[in-house]
Amino acid sequence: MNNKTILIVDDTIANLDILMELLDEYDVIDATNGKDALEILNTEHIDLILLDIMMPEMDGYEVCRRIKSQDETKHIPIIFITAKADEESISKAYDVGGSDYIRKPFFPKELYARIKKELRLEELISELKHLSFIDPLTQLYNRRFFIDSSKTVLEIAKREETPLSLMMIDIDKFKNVNDTYGHQVGDEVLKLLAKTMKSRQRKSDMSCRYGGEEFVILLPKTSITKAEAVAKELRENVQKSYFEMSAQKKIAVTISIGVSTVNIENEINIEKALKRADDALYEAKESGRNCVKVKIK
Ligand SMILES: [Mg+2]
């Protein structure tokens, strides 16, 4: 079974029946007019739409236009299936945002192949979107996405007048891990740290891989005192965790953390707070590593 859901929109019941039978390996939902189709899209998750053009009241072009004008639905591929075969109708189908166009009567295998192609394409696009904001190794946010979203998080903090703190984390002597055991083991250690970070974090916290072995966590609605406590707990948890290379060989690492808070009233982005956290991190390194330092101003 395939768990993709296809919405078929056609005012001719006989056409719906043929398509339903042809696509029995997918979950199929049908609609006989545009209005119903749009309502279904509000409540169901749809992966692809087969859309007739000639329908009373709202034609397929208009249905397509409306789907493509909504942020929630505009990514859904639409294949027009229609008896209209003139050049103008075909070009209009693409103009309004259709992905493909098939004339009735169609070859079932051709339609089937095109559906497969569109679904695969959509999968690839969403994988790419995912990669654009997630660090593939640790599955934490990447730096670019973090900086972009921090603006929104800060705006909310300003509006709600709630504190916004952050911490910068660095693995102690990480170079030694890579030099001694190789980069593959280094990667496992990074993954382990990311997992430890995620295991305790609250839903609103944003963890990001900021650089090679450097991480940042943004903590909304968190005072500097609370942020320091969270950082200390994380430092302890990391010290307790280890990566098991074999039954005999366990690799443990420690982290240093710099904590700061955004001056909600005066600062327009998190850059200054990041700089303070970075300074605090430097201080933590200087005073022997495996500790937490705070810098407010
Ligand atoms: Mg029709």
Image (spheres, rainbow, N blue to C red):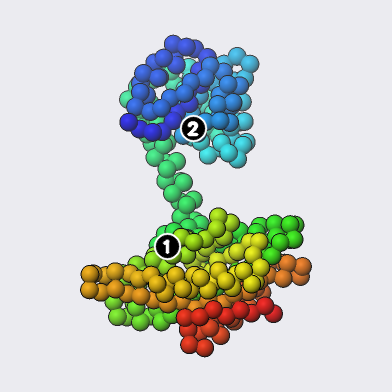
Question: Observer-nearest residue: 124 or 45?
Answer: 45
Q: The N terminus lies in which quarter of the figure?
A: top left
The label number, if any, that marks residue 145 in the structure image: none
Amino acid under label 2? Ile
Q: Secondary structure at mark 2?
A: loop
Q: Residue at x 39, y 65 (%)?
A: 191
Residue 111 placement: quadrant: top left
Q: Is residue 213 visible?
A: no
95 is higher (above) or lower (below) than 19 = below
The label number, if any, that marks residue 46 in the structure image: 2
Q: Secondary structure at mark 1?
A: helix
Give residue 281's position: percent from left, percent from top.
55, 80
Q: Is residue 11 visible?
A: yes
8 is higher (above) or lower (below) than 253 = above
Label 2 CB, ligand 1: below 8 Å?
A: no
Left or right relative to 201: residue 116 = left
Q: Residues within 10 Å of mark 2 (few under 14, many from 20)?
A: some
Give residue 163's position: percent from left, percent from top.
69, 65
Q: Residue at x 65, y 71 (%)?
A: 224
Q: Nearer the viewer, mark 2 or mark 1?
A: 1
The residue that label 1 is drawn on is: 195
Cα–Cα gap, marks 2 and 1: 32 Å
Amino acid under label 1? Lys
